[in-house]
Image (tube, helix red, strand yellow):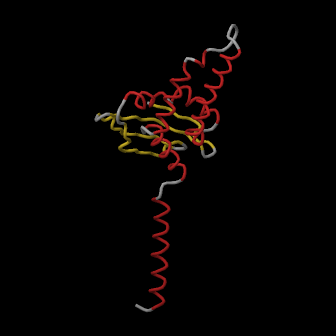
Amino acid sequence: MNKKYAGILGVVIAVVVVALVFVLKPGSDEKLVDDFLHIWFGKSEDNQKLAALFESSEDSAVIMGEGVDEETEAASKEASEKTMKEFENVYGKYFTDSAFQKFVGVNYWYAYDMHTNSKECEVKKVNIFKDNSAYKFKVTLDVDGNEVKEEGRIELQDGKIGSLKIY
C-alpha cells in the first residue's frame, strides 16, 4: 500500500472515530435531564436540607394576613422566602420560571417522602429516551433495600425543563 492511500485511510478512520464520539455522546439536553433526575431522586444533603427547611417553615407560611401581628407575619414571610431561595439554589437552574413554580408546588413531593422517610435512597439506573421533542425517563432506585421505579416525561424549553410529568 502506498503512502498516499495509507494517509487517506488514516484520515477516513479519524473522521469516523470523531463522528462516532459525537453521535454516541449524550447531548447537553440529555445531560441536563440526567443530572436533574439524579439530584431530584437521590438522597442528597441538599434534599435533606430542603425537607428540614420545608418542615420548619410549613406552619409559619400560613401565619399571614388579617389579625396577625407584624412580627409574626414578617418571621413567616422570611422563613418562606428562605425555603424558596434554597429550592431555587438546588433546582432553579434546571427549570423555566413557570415550570419551577409547578415543580415546587406539585412535582417535588414525589421524591419528598423518600428524602424524609428512608434511611437509604440511591439512584441505581437512569434510562432516558428521546421522544420527539421531549425525553421519557425511567429511574430505578434502591430505597431501603427495595427497588422502586419512577417514570415520566420531560419537555425542554430554551435549554431548561419546561414541563415535567410523572406517570
Task: Say which quadrant the C terminus sits in.
Answer: top left
Res 139 → quadrant: top left
Foreground of the two, 164 or 1 = 164
**Extreme top residue here?**
67
**Extreme bottom residue here?**
2
The residue at the point 51 percent across, 32 percent down is 50
Q: Position of residue 131 (x, y in %)?
A: 49, 43
The residue at the point 52 percent across, 38 percent down is 154
Task: Say which quadrant the N terminus sits in.
Answer: bottom left
Foreground of the two, 46 or 13 = 46
Q: Is residue 124 above or below residue 80?
A: below
The residue at the point 53 percent across, 26 percent down is 54
Q: Position of residue 16 (x, y in %)?
A: 46, 70
Figure label count: 0
Q: Position of residue 32 (x, y in %)?
A: 53, 47
Foreground of the two, 107 or 63 = 63
**Extreme left residue here?**
145
The residue at the point 37 percent across, 37 percent down is 121
Foreground of the two, 14 or 48 = 48
